[in-house]
Amino acid sequence: MLERLAARVGGRSMLVSLIVAIAFFMETLDSTIIVTAIPRMANDFGIDPARMSLGITAYVMAAAACVTASGWLADRIGTRTLFAGAIMLFALASLACGLAPNFNAFVAARAVQGAAAAMMSPVGRLVVLRTSEKKDLMKALSALIWPGLVAPVIGPPLGGWITDFASWHWIFFVNVPVALIGLPLVLATVPNERQETKPFDLAGFLLTALALVCLTYGFDLLALRDVASLQLGLGLMVLSVGVGWLALRHMRTTDRPLIRLDALKVKSFFVASVTGGVVSRATISATPFLLPLMLQIAHGMSASQAGGMLMIYMMANLGMKTVTNRLIARFGIRTTLIASSLLAGVTIAACALLSPSLPLAINAAILAAAGAMRSLQFTAVTMVNFADIAPPQRQPASVVSSLTQQIGFGAGVAIGALLLTLSQWSREASAIGLFDFQIALVLAGIASAAASLSYLGLAHDVGDEISGRKPRAA
């Protein structure tokens, strides 16, 4: 049966790629479907909607901590064993999220989900790379792109519809049948390849994980309304910086570090992964977190209505990808980064003007412009990451890039929630209102525009070789 199925889809490597894509779709959908359900979930848990950001941040930071160990584990226990185990763990964690009796249990389940997701994505890509012949590689890898393109578009409206017409719990329960379909296919088709492993850098892993835990919990405590929580939150943030410094120092001095940091010496990589890139990714993640909250809490829309509005934003994000490569090839990565950061800043701030009193066409135009600039900015940052990285450095550079990308995404959501709370405090209001969302969006826009300053230092021809940009005639 599997041989017939493989023949129908274009070969065994393509079948493996499609099976991996199912897991990717489940993972990507889970990260986008939740945003429109947040107000309802906060109400059921009896907490402020801004605190629900911890459910997203815990997922992202757990993924960031565990992604560093995924390659070592895959070589140690085998790609099939780890990939299948990650799918099973993700499904069980999804079930725990839907059954969570309180907010703390929900956050714990989300952290486990994030850890499982950290094993699925890199190991899934590794499986496809190892099972595909060179002539089939482009086709096999292209199948992995579509989950990341389609899931963000259908996630928000689907989450809103499920929340309005069923219950937010089903947002997580739907992962279980998908996993039950994918798991036996993985066991039947994916080879269990192992490779010789070096000793695991346990100290580096624990220091990195501790720094991320302190950062995540510190952000959450800062959003609470009492002096003790504020003091503890600030203390944890300081501790996070200290532990992070120890982790970096350890990785620079040990013989076999968890993460090799050599790529950070390359200026373009440092800018894209640490300075401007982190700020850009933070604003990229903060906006789709703030928008559905504003539309529901401040403007009184239902979850499904807010999901429909956010779909415009995500469709523009997807549509822009059809012309992004041509724009970058025409103007170059540096110019595109600077322009997209500035334009993204303007369009993010413009989202503060969204209102049911405006014509739908104007609201749609604002959302579409913001979504398009998000896509252009994200693609340009991703491309410059590896513009000057030599082939021997690409694997460790990829790990560093994945880690800082997740940190940027998680910090964006956490800071967005914190800005809402701080604005509410400053007004001495009992609940978050429209003004608070407007302040948060405007500040996110300013941060996006400010990221352009770090891109000014890049060489004018950075990334021309990979973007296909032709050198100017003398």
Image (cartoon, rainbow, N blue to C red):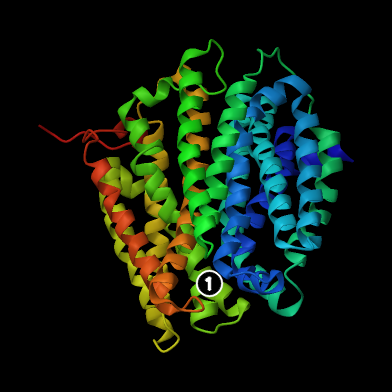
Q: Quadrant of residue 208?
A: top right
* Image-based side of 191 in relation to 307, left or right: right
Q: Nearer the viewer, residue 428 or 353?
A: 428
Q: Looking at the picture, which amino acid does disc 1 mark?
A: Leu
Quadrant of the frame with the C terminus: top left
Residue beneath the point at 71% across and 15% down: 195
Q: Nearer the viewer, residue 17 or 3?
A: 17
Residue beneath the point at 73% across and 64% down: 171
* Image-based side of 137 in relation to 23, left or right: left
Q: Picture coordinates of residue 129 (x, y %)?
A: 63, 28
Residue 180 visible in image: yes
Residue at the front extreme of this rendering: 228
Q: Picture coordinates of residue 139 (x, y %)?
A: 60, 38
Quadrant of the frame with the N terminus: top right
Residue at the left extreme of this rendering: 474
Residue at the bottom extreme of this rendering: 357
Residue beneath the point at 81% across and 34% down: 189
Q: Picture coordinates of residue 112 (x, y %)?
A: 72, 45
Q: Nearer the viewer, residue 197 or 96?
A: 96
Describe the element under mark 1 as helix, strand or loop.
helix
Residue beneath the point at 76% across and 39% down: 86
Q: Picture coordinates of residue 467 (x, y %)?
A: 35, 37
Q: Quadrant of residue 104?
A: bottom right
Q: Check the image and report above or below for 466 versus 373.
A: above
Badge 1 local density, few (<14 within 10 Å), some, or many (20+)?
many
* Image-based side of 80 in relation to 358, left or right: right
Q: Which residue is mark 1?
A: 293
Q: Check the image and report above or below for 94 versus 255.
A: below
